[in-house]
């Protein structure tokens, strides 16, 4: 079990860096620019991810020792604070939660069995949210009646397991390559994630824009059109509106981590 957790930890780190370097991504930091985040850069995001990496290693050790949920949560809160101090913003707060949840849930499930993992994620999420919910996320959810990552987690991450991963696998099976399959995952997540960052910045109209663009992106990939040019053009539009999609980015990173863990990313 320890070897399994260590390997998953390494893949969770890898998935986060792969998401950062994926280019272009509308409104998000990538190798071209900072999207709708003028306060950030690739270098600052890398510095944040180094802190997240250390957190995941510490969490892996805590889970292997059988530490209680309170201790696991304490490590996550400490990581969020460390990122805030170092970077000046909590740019990976969602991923700290998602990756930590997957790692802890994996210790209670059977290897790569996705149904067992989802059941464990649902159970742990219920325990976590029984202790309360972060204030900002709670306010956004109430204002816009959005589910956000809370509802995703409580449902066993359906946007990941029911949407993004099957899209990746179908794209590969239909003759696509790893790049097109990853962007197909991005397109599907844009359609399905109730992104609280987008809601907070641009309300329901921002979320509608992301979903429409996600549908268009997935359609362009299926038709073998130039979807990279489309994404680059949309990035300028997102930046002009201050629109971004942090929840989508976090779940994309988690998908890349899981596909790396299962070996499907390398096989692609």
Image (spheres, rainbow, N blue to C red):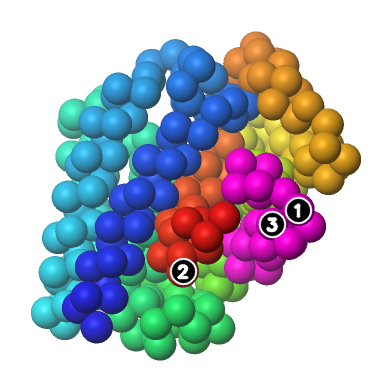
**Is residue 166 part of the magenta span, yes or no?**
yes
For the record, the magenta segment spans 160-182
- Label 2 sits on a secondary structure element that is helix
Mark 3 Cα shell of 10 Å, populated few (<14), some (14-19), many (≥20): some
Upstream in sequence: badge 2 or badge 1: 1
**Rendered location of residue 5, percent (x, y):** 26, 72
Q: Position of residue 25 (x, y in %)?
A: 59, 29
Mark on residue 175? 1
Q: CA distance from mark 1 to mark 3?
A: 6 Å
Quarter of the image where the N terminus is located: bottom left
The quadrant holding residue 231 is top right
Q: In terms of depth relative to the viewer, which is nearer, 146 or 226?
A: 226
Comparing 252 with 245, the one in front is: 252
From the image, tell me which residue sits under label 2.
Answer: 262
Q: Which mark is residue 172?
A: 3
Secondary structure at badge 1 equals loop
Q: CA distance from mark 3 to mark 2?
A: 15 Å
């Amino acid at each position: 079990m320890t070897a399994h957790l260590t390997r998953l930890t390494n893949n969770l780190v890898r998935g986060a860096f792969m998401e950062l370097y994926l280019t272009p991504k509308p409104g998000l930091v990538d190798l071209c620019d900072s999207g709708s985040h003028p306060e950030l850069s690739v270098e600052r995001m890398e510095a944040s991810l180094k802190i997240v990496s250390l957190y995941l290693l510490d969490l892996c050790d805590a889970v292997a020792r059988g530490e209680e949920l309170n201790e696991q949560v304490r490590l996550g809160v400490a990581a969020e604070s460390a990122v805030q101090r170092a970077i000046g913003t909590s740019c990976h707060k969602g991923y700290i939660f998602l990756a930590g949840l997957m790692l802890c849930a994996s210790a209670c499930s059977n290897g790569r069995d996705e149904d067992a993992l989802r059941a464990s994620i649902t159970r742990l999420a219920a325990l976590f949210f029984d202790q309360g919910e972060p204030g900002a996320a709670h306010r956004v959810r109430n204002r816009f009646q959005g589910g956000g990552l809370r509802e995703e987690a409580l449902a066993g991450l359906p946007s990941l397991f029911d949407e993004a991963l099957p899209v990746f696998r179908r794209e590969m099976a239909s003759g696509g390559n790893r790049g097109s399959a990853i962007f197909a995952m991005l397109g599907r997540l844009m359609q399905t994630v109730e992104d609280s960052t987008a809601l907070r910045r641009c309300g329901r109209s921002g979320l509608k824009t992301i979903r429409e663009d996600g549908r268009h992106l997935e359609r362009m990939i299926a038709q073998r059109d130039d979807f990279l040019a489309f994404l680059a053009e949309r990035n300028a539009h997102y930046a002009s509106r201050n629109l971004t999609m942090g929840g989508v980015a976090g779940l994309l990173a988690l998908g890349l981590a899981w596909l790396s863990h299962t070996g499907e990313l390398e096989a692609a």
